[in-house]
Amino acid sequence: MRLIRLATLPVLISLAACGGESATPATPAATGLSTLTVGKQSATEERLWDGVVEAVNKATLSAQTGGRVTELPFDVNDYVKVGDVIVRFTDIEQQSGRRQADASLRAAEAAAREAKLAFDRAKEMIEKKLVAQAVYDQAVARNDAAKAALEAARAAVRQAGEQVDYTVVRAPYSGILTERHVQVGETVRPGQPLVSGLSLAQLRVEVEVPQGDLSAIRDQKKAAILLDDGRRIDAKAVIVFPYADARTHSFKIRLELPEVETGLQPGMTVKTAFAIGQTDRLLIPVNALVQRSEVTAVYAIDAKQRVALRQVRLGHRFGDQAEVLAGLNEGEQIAADPLAALALLAGQKEATQ
């Protein structure tokens, strides 16, 4: 049901209830119609500001090796899955470097084996006092140097392998490609931006609020996103930045959203509601409302048990209840079942004819 709201209302009272019902339980009227007595309830007082939706995960991937771009499988606005190849370079230089590293490793392994054999012989001979100490010391030094050279060669092989791997750039997470910074055939260097993208899986909202409201917001630590379809998404975390904008004297607040289907997209503006305290407001069940074109109404019952359709002006809808801003007073009776009230009203009209 689409409900009428006041666009200029600076303060919104939502149904983050502190207990109790918005109206007394349904009771049969003399007409046999179940009714509700409109009453006030302690509810959360909220203030509204616009916020901007942004992705938690967004990044620009840069080249970690040099080469010529040979493939760009995805275009801007394409959806990519985690691990998909999004850029591929030529790897001639990198493959050559890996072969050289492999050859150097084999040479280092041979040198290490030879140095180990020489060390073992020198050790055996020094124990038998067949060689001078200086000869043994030289064998130890050559063996240690060969070991170090072998470790360096192994590290060079790993590095050469990484350079080959860097010629294929894969998506770090599933999401949307938002920008391509290079084209096929272009030669890139290490550190050059390649593509930008973002994930739609995790979203957050950033809001700027005046410094005068910051104290109440910090005390309450509750906020929600108000969607166009009437849904309310409670923020799972309210993060207040520890500094103000020097020009506007406003503070930035980040709202972390739960991973639920909201229909929101990065870059959208949304209405946000921040709890600033408690107040009493008239609240009625949404099921008691009637929608007639652009008019929202209820079936009111007067002291003579007569039924009449009465227009009401609503605040924000939250869950199964709504705030009444105008059209009803505390203590008045309304029909709990609009269909039954409609039938009774039709009977009343026939009786008067």
Image (cartoon, rainbow, N blue to C red):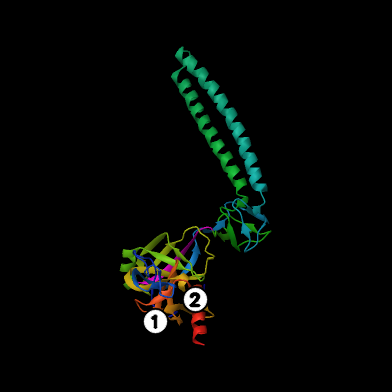
Would residue 124 be seen by someone viewing this image from the given angle?
A: yes
* Residue furthest top as drawn: 128
| Amino acid identity at mark 1 | Lys
Q: Where is residue 94 in the image (x, y as percent from the top left)?
A: 63, 46
* Residue 124 is inside the magenta segment: no
Disc 2 on helix, strand or loop? strand
Q: Left of 1 or right of it: where is 48?
A: left
Quick one: label 2, few (<14), some, or many (20+) residues within 10 Å? many
Mark 1, mark 2: which one is toward the viewer? 1
Q: Left of 324 or right of it: where is 173?
A: right
Boundaries of the magenta span: 201-211
- Give the residue at mark 2: 290
* Residue furthest bottom as drawn: 353
Q: Which quadrant of the structure image shows residue 29?
A: bottom left
Q: Which quadrant of the structure image shows residue 13?
A: bottom left
Return the residue nearer the eye: 211 or 183. Answer: 211
Q: Left of 180 or right of it: where is 27?
A: left
Return the residue nearer the eye: 327 or 257. Answer: 327
The residue depicted at 62 percent of the width and 46 percent of the height is: 164
- Give the residue at mark 1: 304
Q: Please tell me the numbered disc located at residue 17.
A: none
Would residue 211 be seen by someone viewing this image from the given angle?
A: no
Q: Position of residue 266 (x, y in %)?
A: 53, 65
Quick one: label 1, few (<14), some, or many (20+) residues within 10 Å? few
Q: Where is residue 225 in the image (x, y as percent from the top left)?
A: 45, 67
